[in-house]
Amino acid sequence: MSDLEEMRNAIVAFTQERDWDQFHDGKNLAIALSIEASELLESFLWKDAKDVKQSKIEEELADVFNYAILIADKYNLDVKKIVLEKLKRNAEKYPVEKSRGSAKKYDEL
């Protein structure tokens, strides 16, 4: 069993034990993911990036991962597959020779 599978199983078991599946439709999971991502951003608000508490980043990032994995589970998505496919598409949009060291969007390269 992969680490990702182990995490997915643990997250799903956690929510099923609490009967939270009834609240976890795609829309609500996406909203929860956005809120948790905002809480991660809030950790950086009005601070230098170096002054953010590591423990706060870990806590909020874990919440982001939890909801992302629940969304993948809800839609029977293979996380490894979709991430690698997206990286492949991004590599086509951002070829190394044009994008290395640049923050420009692909249509500005």
Image: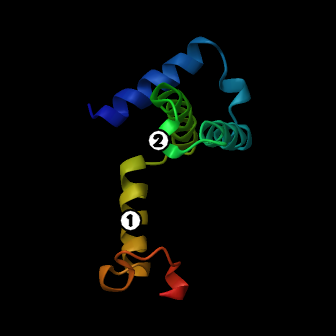
Residue at x-position 45% and y-position 30%: 54
Q: In this view, does 36 lie to the left or right of 83?
A: right
Q: Where is residue 103 in the image (x, y as percent from the top left)?
A: 48, 73
Mark 2: give few (<14), some (14-19) or many (20+) Cα within 10 Å. few
In the rendered view, tell whether residue 86 sits above or below residue 55.
below
Q: Looking at the picture, how far across and down is residue 38, in whole percent? A: 67, 42
Q: Mark 2 points at which residue?
A: 50
Residue 14 drawn above or below residue 24: above
Which is nearer the eye, 105 or 18?
A: 105
Instruction: Confirm whether residue 76 shows in the render.
Output: no
Crowdedness near tag 1: few (<14), some (14–19) or many (≥20) residues, C-alpha within 10 Å: few
Q: Which image quadrant for residue 83? A: bottom left
Q: Quadrant of the N terminus?
A: top left
Which of the two discs, 1 and 2, labels the residue nearer the N terminus?
2
Q: Mark on residue 87?
A: 1
Quadrant of the rendered structure where residue 28 is? top right
Q: Residue at x 66, y 42 (%)?
A: 45
Picture residue at 38% right of the left edge, 65% below the top: 87
